[in-house]
Image (tube, rainbow, N blue to C red):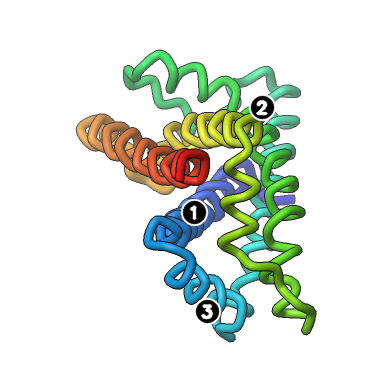
Amino acid sequence: MLPSIAKKVIMSVTGLFLILFLTLHVVANLTILWGPEVYQKVTDFMGTNPLIQVMVPVLALGFIIHIGYSFIITLSNLKARGPVTYASGSKSPGLGFDNWAARNMLILGCIVLGFLVLHLSHFWTKMQWQQFSGGQPEDGYLLVTGYLGTPWIAVSYIIWFAALWLHINHGFWSAFHTLGLNNLRIIPVLRRISYVYSTLLFAGFSLIVIWCMFF
């Protein structure tokens, strides 16, 4: 049985790894703004590049570990009647939504996970998986613009991105806090960086959806 701090460190490391993946993901998908030719080249590269293919199971393992330990830590905290956080006892002041997110990280994580499953079932299985398994992938540009261009789906995705924004806004700085950057002068800086970083991710993903709706 791993000690509590080891579990939180694993949560922090896997969380930062997943944030890095999201950053690469939004950058790759923003190429859709440059038209079908550019976007198709990017999707073809992602579907056939050996390094990316190797990273797929690594990424999946990262998700499994992060989600698994989130439930383990939550159950442990419930038994101990302590707060559910990545970090250990930071009381530095923050914005109200960050404090709310800190108390509801598991709920936000479950929302993100639910939409992630739907997202993968509609896109990854019809594009990258088909390339990997030798099938015929669908046209990525038409698939993405057609699906995300549907108004109710677009609104649902923006709500998902909002939950992701809240989750990352707290989780980003808290992960560094757990890993030892817990100086009282550093924490406010990390909070600001976390806010800016999570907001940029939210803006990037939302821009893709809005573009698909109107263009």
Question: In the current view of this chain or complex, which residue is farthest to the top?
Answer: 96
Q: Tell me, yes or no, if residue 20 can be seen here.
A: no
Q: Residue at x 63, y 49 (%)?
A: 146
Kindly report the distance in space between the C-alpha atoms of the residues bearing marks 3 and 2. 35 Å
Q: Residue at x 48, y 72 (%)?
A: 42
Kindly report the distance in space between the C-alpha atoms of the residues bearing marks 2 and 1. 19 Å
- Single out the mark in the foreground, 2 or 1: 1
Q: Residue at x 55, y 71 (%)?
A: 43
**Label 2 amino acid?**
Ile
Q: Label 1's element?
A: helix
- For the residue pair 62 and 125, the one nearer the viewer reads as 125
Kindly report the distance in space between the C-alpha atoms of the residues bearing marks 1 and 3. 17 Å
| Mark earlier in primary sequence (3, 2) | 3
- Image marks 3 and 2: residues in contact by CB distance under 8 Å: no
- For the residue pair 76 and 102, the one nearer the viewer reads as 102
Q: Residue 46 location, x and y as percent?
A: 55, 74
**Label 3 amino acid?**
Phe
For disc 1, the marked residue is 22
- For the residue pair 130 and 192, the one nearer the viewer reads as 130
Eyeballing the image, is 94 above or below 215? above
For disc 2, the marked residue is 107
Q: Residue 193 location, x and y as percent?
A: 28, 39
80 left or right, relative to 171: right
- For the residue pair 88 and 65, the one nearer the viewer reads as 65
Q: Residue at x 53, y 33 (%)?
A: 158
For disc 3, the marked residue is 45
